Amino acid sequence: MKFSPLFTELFNTLINLIYPPFCLFCEVPLPSNAQLMLCSTCLSLVKIVTEPLCLCCGHPFTKYGGASHLCGTCLSSPPFFDQARALFLYEDPIKTIIHKFKYNDQAAGLKIAPYSMAQCNHLSGLINPDIIIPVPVHKNRLRKRGFNQSVRLAQIFYPTSIHKINTTTLIRAVDSAPQTSLSGMARRTNLKNAFLIRNGDELSAKKIVLVDDVFTTGTTVNECAKLLKKNGAAEVKVLTLARVKD
Ligand SMILES: [Zn+2]
Ligand SMILES: [Zn+2]
């Protein structure tokens, strides 16, 4: 069944009048026509990633100012991905929004993503990829959660390129422990052989953007990028909703 946009709008207005929306972070009531699901106070706390940042891994140089350049880590041991960019710093209220999205399937807070993308000039290199690959989750976790958060994010980041989203080539073969529970060396060991490629021919000479929710140490996306490059990808860039400020 398909409703007309006018009907949907009227329906939503009515629902908002009966159940006024609440700020997803501090839970104060919002006006019934609220768009971003955050009150103005919480909205002012959101930290958008801005330049200067590392030209490769996207590490923000908030304290130093000046021009973007390569960070020490990318200079001494360049990652397999060509560029990683994030929209927000992984701090509240974004941290709470991501948590509600991943674990309560509450996606309303993500409306802030397209609104903020327009303010991130550093995303210009990720505009027109050939293939968009959401970082896959293992089928066991998919069954438990019901959705892959990275697929939803890819749809939000690239609303006019849904046809480029590929969920069949990069596969999560091992249901490894969540990376957040591990550190350093254990993260790398945990991901050993965690991913595999099916029909790798499709990747040949392609410009790829990998999509994930949070960039922490970059170990997961780097492992994926290594595999994609090994299978012929010309370029692998990474786009995440947030990144941990390290
Ligand atoms: Zn609030
Ligand atoms: Zn870097």
Image (spheres, rainbow, N blue to C red):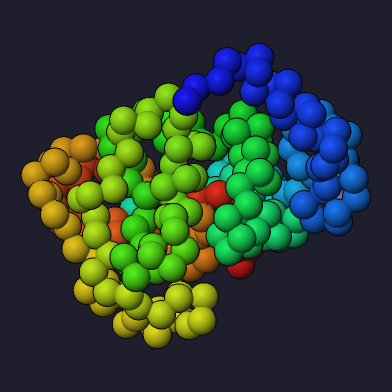
Identify which residue is drawn at 35% across, 77% down: 176
The answer to whether 81 appears left or right of 45 in the picture is: left
The answer to whether 69 appears left or right of 196 in the picture is: right
Identify which residue is drawn at 34% across, 53% down: 81
- The location of residue 101, given as percent across then percent down, is 60, 55
Q: Is residue 187 above or below residue 167?
A: below
- The location of residue 220, given as percent across then percent down, is 38, 65
Q: Nearer the viewer, residue 222 or 162?
A: 162
- The mark total stands at 0
Q: Is residue 156 above or below residue 94?
A: above
The answer to whether 198 appears left or right of 83 in the picture is: left
Q: Is residue 52 above or below residue 137?
A: above
Furthest residue to the front?
Answer: 1
Quarter occupied by the C terminus: bottom right
Q: Nearer the viewer, residue 71 or 229?
A: 229
The answer to whether 88 appears left or right of 227 in the picture is: right
- The location of residue 83, given as percent across then percent down, is 41, 47
Identify which residue is drawn at 75% across, 48% down: 46
- Residue 50 can be seen in this image: no
- The location of residue 124, given as percent across then percent down, is 48, 31
Identify which residue is drawn at 38% across, 28% down: 161
- Residue 31 can be seen in this image: yes
- Which quadrant of the view contains residue 102? bottom right
